[in-house]
Image: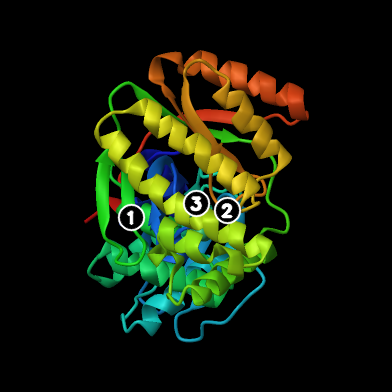
């Protein structure tokens, strides 16, 4: 089911007997290229997508937050005065965001409402970051806080790192906060400087969900981060982003085989990401596609975060005549791939690739053309 603001407002009205004071929306994201580069201070090129988390709310006179989740059919309640961990994993993203905002010195007000979303959960489309950014947007509305997307993205990331306990980088929250309709965002993850890069006309971005979910992802993710840090230390820099291809070549022999390949992925992926943004700007879809394909190979062979299902999906996508390029997207080990294709061929592409993938793996995938949307915003109310 896909949602919109009227639907979410109607669901609020059913429950609370009046229209919501605000409806806020924060999108999921898909990353075109620049994978496992954000925590290396490097470059990423994601887009915010037309799948989002919505919160419809009204203020409360006290300092409580009461939320009903339509996706989990559960109610969560917490006090802003005594924030503590609880037993409902989805509510921890709301509490963690409240903690992070309060810890940054913002005075928060209580509210009640409903949360609903159409970002598939655990698929690598950043449903968690969308929930954090929607929560931050809701608190900003009800508490009269200034809305500064990069600052809010950092606080969302802090909630995830410190409250939820996942050591993610900044890409997901920043894409959800700062997305631009019709554009991908080239983000420098060290300075957080963001450049909107418009999609050439006639191009479609397809999300290809393998219907497999990442197992073991957290430990493997942390291991990759540690290997990247070890490699950066050898090169005497804080982030691998500062290692050029030349510098890498000179000292690569000093790294053990796995660490060398991890570092090679990051060094080459940063280059590919910058080149991909340039290729988009000059509407060179052949180069853009090739860079996506190369990124997949590097993630599969050097960074080792792909899996048989993702490889099968990417192969099926790349074989289609409408496809410019395809790769796994997000942390890896399952979840989604992304393809850039000619929009005119999208019906045949989704049908053919889905059938081929199913034949190869036995999994029933979902493929959809997605639109690049704006980042977190208030869609009803002011
Ligand atoms: C996850 C993390 C991001 C990023 C990607 C890999 O989505 O949340 O910060 O590291 O993996 O590019």
Q: Position of residue 231 (x, y in %)?
A: 55, 70
Query: Looking at mark 2, is its residue's CB closer than 8 Å to ligand 1?
Result: yes
The residue under the point 55% across, 50% down is: 70
Please name the residue that numbered disc 1 is placed on. 187
Q: By what rule are the colours in the image chosen?
A: rainbow
Vertical comparison of 246 with 8: above or below: below
Instruction: Indicate which disc, 2 or 1, sits on the residue closer to the N terminus.
Output: 1
Q: What is the secondary structure assignment of the residue under circle 1?
A: strand
Q: Residues within 10 Å of mark 1 (few under 14, many from 20)?
A: many
When asked about the image quadrant of residue 372, the answer is top left
Vertical comparison of 162 with 70: above or below: below
Q: Which residue in the rendered view is the most extreme toward the right?
A: 362
- Image quarter hosting the C terminus: bottom left
Please name the residue that numbered disc 2 is placed on. 331
Please name the residue that numbered disc 3 is placed on. 35
Q: Position of residue 205 (x, y in %)?
A: 43, 31
Instruction: Indicate which disc, 3 or 2, sits on the residue closer to the N terminus.
Output: 3
Query: Looking at mark 3, is its residue's CB closer than 8 Å to ligand 1?
Result: yes
Q: Residues within 10 Å of mark 2 (few under 14, many from 20)?
A: many
| Relative side of 53 to 184, left or right | right
- Please state which of residues 129 and 91 is positioned toward the viewer in this rendering: 129
The residue under the point 56% across, 48% down is: 124
Q: Residues within 10 Å of mark 3 (few under 14, many from 20)?
A: many
| Relative side of 123 to 116, left or right | right
User: Do tag 1 and tag 3 residues touch (Cβ < 8 Å)?
Assistant: no
User: Do tag 2 and tag 1 residues touch (Cβ < 8 Å)?
Assistant: no
Q: CA distance from mark 1 to mark 3?
A: 12 Å
Q: What is the secondary structure assignment of the residue under circle 3?
A: loop
């Amino acid at each position: 089911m896909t949602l919109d603001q009227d639907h979410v407002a109607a669901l609020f009205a059913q429950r609370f007997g009046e229209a919501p004071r605000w409806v806020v929306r924060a999108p999921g994201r898909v990353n075109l290229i620049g994978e496992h580069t954000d925590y290396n201070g490097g470059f990423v090129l994601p887009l915010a997508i037309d799948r989002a988390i919505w919160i419809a709310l009204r203020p409360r006179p006290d300092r409580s937050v009461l939320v009903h989740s339509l996706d989990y059919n559960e109610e969560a309640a917490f006090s802003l005065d005594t924030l503590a961990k609880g037993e409902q994993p989805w509510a921890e993203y709301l509490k963690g965001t409240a903690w992070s905002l309060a810890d940054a010195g913002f005075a928060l007000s209580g509210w009640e409402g409903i949360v609903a979303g159409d970002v598939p959960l655990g698929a690598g489309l950043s449903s968690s970051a969308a929930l954090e950014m929607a929560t931050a947007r809701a608190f900003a509305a009800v508490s009269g806080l200034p809305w500064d997307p990069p600052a809010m993205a950092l606080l969302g990331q802090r909630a995830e790192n410190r409250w939820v306990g996942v050591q993610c980088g900044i890409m997901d929250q920043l894409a959800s906060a700062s997305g631009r309709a019709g554009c991908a965002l080239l983000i420098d993850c060290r300075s957080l400087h963001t450049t909107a890069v418009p999609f050439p006309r006639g191009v479609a971005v397809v999300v290809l969900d393998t219907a497999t979910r990442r197992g073991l992802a957290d430990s493997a993710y942390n291991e990759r981060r540690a290997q990247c840090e070890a490699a950066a230390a050898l090169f005497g820099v804080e982030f691998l982003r500062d290692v050029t291809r030349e510098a890498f070549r000179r000292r690569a022999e000093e790294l053990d085989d796995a660490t060398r390949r991890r570092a090679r992925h990051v060094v080459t992926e940063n280059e590919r990401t910058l080149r991909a943004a340039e290729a988009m700007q000059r509407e060179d879809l052949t180069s853009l596609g090739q860079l996506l394909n190369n990124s997949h190979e590097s993630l599969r062979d050097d960074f080792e975060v792909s899996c048989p299902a993702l490889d099968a999906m990417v192969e099926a996508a790349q074989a289609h005549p409408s496809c410019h390029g395809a790769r796994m997207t997000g942390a890896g080990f399952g979840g989604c791939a992304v393809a850039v294709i000619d929009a005119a061929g999208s019906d045949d592409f989704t049908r053919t690739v889905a059938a081929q993938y199913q034949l190869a793996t036995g999994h029933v995938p979902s493929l959809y053309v997605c639109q690049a949307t704006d980042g977190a915003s208030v869609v009803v109310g002011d």
